[in-house]
Image (tube, rainbow, N blue to C red):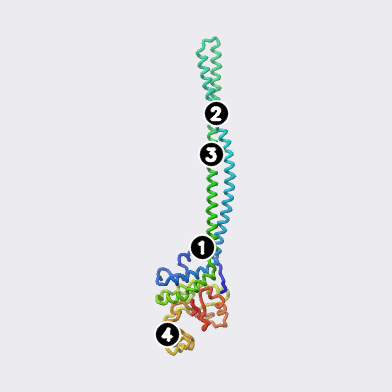
Amino acid sequence: MTTRQRTLPSSAAAAIIALTAAGSAIGLPTSAHAAVPKVATNWTRLMHRSLTHDTTLATMRTTLATHQAAVRASNAEVAAAAKAERGTRAVLKTATIADANAQARYTSARKALNTAKQGLNTVSKSKSKSRTRAIARAKRAVTAATKTVTVRKSQAQNAAAALSAAGKASRAARARIAKADAAVAAESAAVAKTQNAITALPTAAALATQAAAVSRDVVEQVRPAFKNTDTTKVYGVTVHRNIAFAFKRMIDDAKADGVEISGGGFRTKERQAELRKINGCPDVWTAPSSSCRVPTAIPGRSLHELGLAVDITSGGKTITSKSVAFKWMQAHAKEYGLINFPAEAWHWSISGS
């Protein structure tokens, strides 16, 4: 099988993935069609994943690139934060020394003031003839010591504030490093997870092959539970909801290649009986399909009655083995889950019958 993937616009990628997960894309049965067997829903999901494989892969690769860029940015932030932290550490060291010196000078100034006050007290009690001059000198000493204490106190307060700011800056720098390290770890984990998901993503061909492997089970399980409400219209062609998405993509992709495709899909058991009569079957209910002028399945056996088969037309005419549409179908239909019934160039179904 030659696989041809159509890549949708990147803006639609996330929506497609979400629709796949939710089961609400065209052709995926909703709760209103709960009678549809699980195997049919599985077939639809496999085909949907196959047909959106390239878009999904492109989205995953974009996500991977985003995480890889985030790892690089986070590593750069770690380096910048480490450099900043070294700077704050140096400032903190300088501020610590300056604070210790300022506090020591302040303590020394207070001791000097106490000494000056004690000297003033001593000379004030003296009976010496030079007492007046001694008191004046002692007072001047107290005044000078008081001014020094005031200056040293201010310097000590400034040094303490600078130390506090340096400590805060240092803590902030360490927190910045921790945050950047955490970002590197988180983005690296995201890179690994996305890489694993890309590696584990099955190819489009593998997904289509898985769908083909269960197609006969789909037919067998859909038949007893089928209701007319399990069908829907795709560009005017009535098909089973479970093949609607793939059928629509096939028509769209064929059109993109310059090939017009339409056809006749679902028909009732009564209409199948009418066609048997029109096609000259010896017995409507028992004669084999090959006994009719145009091979026509016995009512109750045709996949048209389930909406799982389509008689392909192009330009309003039934296709033949020599038509361009047939050749296109022959090359690409398996990508959309449809197989040709060899005896009828126009008849395509999920199981080839």
Query: Looking at the picture, which amino acid does disc 2 mark?
Result: Ala
Looking at the image, do the residues carrying marks 1 and 4 touch, with CB atoms under 8 Å apart?
Answer: no
Query: Looking at the picture, which amino acid does disc 1 mark?
Result: Ala
Task: Please state, as top left, top right, bottom left or bottom right, where the N terminus lies in the image.
Answer: bottom right
Which of labels 2 and 4 is toward the front? 2
**Which residue in the protein does label 1 denote?**
14
Marks 1 and 2, how far apart at CA: 67 Å
Marks 3 and 4, how far apart at CA: 91 Å
Marks 2 and 4, how far apart at CA: 111 Å
Give the answer, above or below, for where 303 lies relative to 54: below
Query: Looking at the picture, which amino acid does disc 3 mark?
Result: Gly
**Which residue in the protein does label 2 denote?**
104
**Which residue in the protein does label 3 denote?**
167
Q: Which mark is residue 250?
A: none
Give the answer, above or below, for where 183 lies relative to 50: above
Give the answer, above or below, for where 295 lies relative to 252: below
**Which residue in the protein does label 4 denote?**
273
Within 10 angstroms of label 2, few (less than 14), some, or many (20 or more) residues? few
